[in-house]
Image: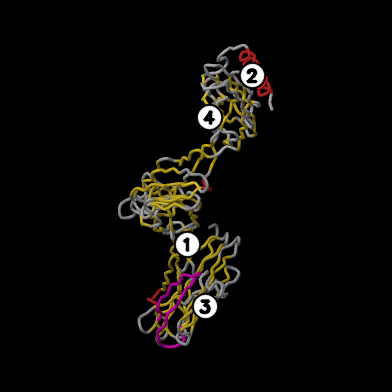
Amino acid sequence: MNLNSVRGLGSALMLSFMSLALSGCGGGDGGGHHNSSSSGGSSSSSSSSGASSSSGSSSSSSSGTSATLTAVQVTPANPSIALGTTQQFTATAIYSDSSKQDVTAQASWSAVDPTVASISASGLAKALKQGSTGIGATYQGLSGSATLAVTPAVISSLAVTPGSASIAKGTTRQFTATATLSDGTTQNETANVTWSSTATAVATIDANGLATGVATGSATIKAVHKTAAVSATASLTVTPAVVASVAVTPANASLAKGTTRQYAATATFTDSTTQDVTKTVTWSSSATGVATVSNAGGSNGLVAAVAPGSATISAAYPNGPTGSTGLTVTTAALVSIQVTAANSGHVPAGYVLQFHATGTYSDSSTKDLTGSATWSTFDPSVATVSNSAGIAGLVTGVKSGSTTVLASFGSVSGFSAVTVGNATLTGLAITPANPTIGNVGGTIQFTATGSFNDGESLDLTDMATWASSNSSVATISNSAGSQGLATVKSALVGGTSTISATLNGANASTTLTRKLGG
């Protein structure tokens, strides 16, 4: 029994003794809250146990018997409440005649451990921390008590956030369920609720609260707690799909200087659909000195390689994302080879005709590839072609007929026709005719041109046999690649030499003069 109970019991005993004394002296109703009458003498007594204190008393008189307070009872006797919640206690006065009276408002209330629970003057207890404490009520010297147990805080309400959201079709939105506990604290309960959508054709939601927009419209997202009797809702609006990303193709391409390449932009929407937006986006190049890209109607996305280097090609969707890719511009690439020859490609059997290969590059520049190309003929029984240094591209007619001469460089090839006839050589001519050169020496290239009985003429420099009549003035080469090249010797005196060319019984000559003081 606590201190208040002890004090209450003492007071009750004192009142009982006083009542007995007054009774013996013929005194009437003292200490009771009301009177009860009987036809004869009477005695009264009461006892209490549990949560009330009592004091036995009795009184009698010729006019009646007065009831006395015997106990105070506190109810509920052993309640249990969650942290942060309240409990209303009631104090009931019990009298010797077994009558009862609610004295909650008149009693004095107290808590044995005020850190566990507080108690107001009206008997309302509030749980402050987990544990237990005695709750006491004292009335007219008597006390009653109860035991209050405070359990952990419980969920009192639930909220879903965001409370209202809007997402594009095909996108997602994470919802969160937050519980407010009885002690005023909050905690995330997203994983402890059951999620649902009122319109799954518009939006779905998974067990983790992740909503997905399925079609335009509205839906209500609901969260029901799995263990607590609380739930909450939020509204979700699904709008039409929007552009989520832009892809630029070709990706990380390489272009040769002077070439162009058509680029494309493809938009992927939030609902996973795609669309060609090449004409919708705004194109740009990070390095216009390396590559440019067009925004002109009819050529949107056309990239032109300007100079070797690197650039980023970008496509920006209006009020949306931008896609990009890298571009490397290399040196100009060979795009074609033109094969040509003098005399319209006609050569008599047994004679030679020089073919030439000219390469055209992506930047429109050209280059002589005669010595670099790989030569071949489609029909070597009609004509052959040399790949030897100095005479590459030199075609020899084998027999009467036609075939094709091919020049290849890398993956690029060019070709031209050659016709082999049966014409015979009728004469030779040497050019330049009768040249003069100074006595300091030097070189001069002679050319032997043959005339044939079909009226055609042909450069036979490489076939003729060359000679110089005066080697002290000049020598002349018969080596492959340098036939007809005369070297004039330096001297202090002038002089002349006869330069001659002979082929198949035909010959020609001219005079080379070394001029003194030249």
Q: Which residue is mark 4?
A: 88
Q: Residue at x 62, y 16 (%)?
A: 19
Query: Which numbered mark, 2 or 1, is in the foreground of this view?
Result: 2
Asked if residue 405 lies in the magenta stretch, the reply is yes
Q: Amino acid at mark 2?
A: Ser
Mark 4, secondary structure of its residue: strand
Mark positioned earlier in the residue sequence (2 or 1): 2
In space, the residues marked 3 and 4 are separated at their CA atoms by 117 Å
Q: Nearer the viewer, residue 106 or 278?
A: 106
**Amino acid marked by disc 1:** Ala
Residue 273 versus residue 460 in the image, above or below:
above
Q: Earlier in the sequence, mark 2 or mark 3?
A: 2
Q: Which residue is mark 3?
A: 386
At label 2, counting other C-alpha atoms closer than 10 Å, the crowd grade (few under 14, some 14-19, many 20 or more) is many
Crowding around mark 1 (Cα neighbors within 10 Å: few <14, some 14 to 19, many 20+) is some
Look at the numbered discs 3 and 1 and tell me whether their residues touch, using CB distance below 8 Å.
no
Q: Nearer the viewer, residue 319 or 176?
A: 176
Q: Which residues are magenta?
A: 397-418
Q: Which quadrant would the N terminus be assigned to in this image?
A: top right
Q: CA distance from mark 2 to mark 1?
A: 125 Å
Q: Amino acid at mark 4?
A: Gln
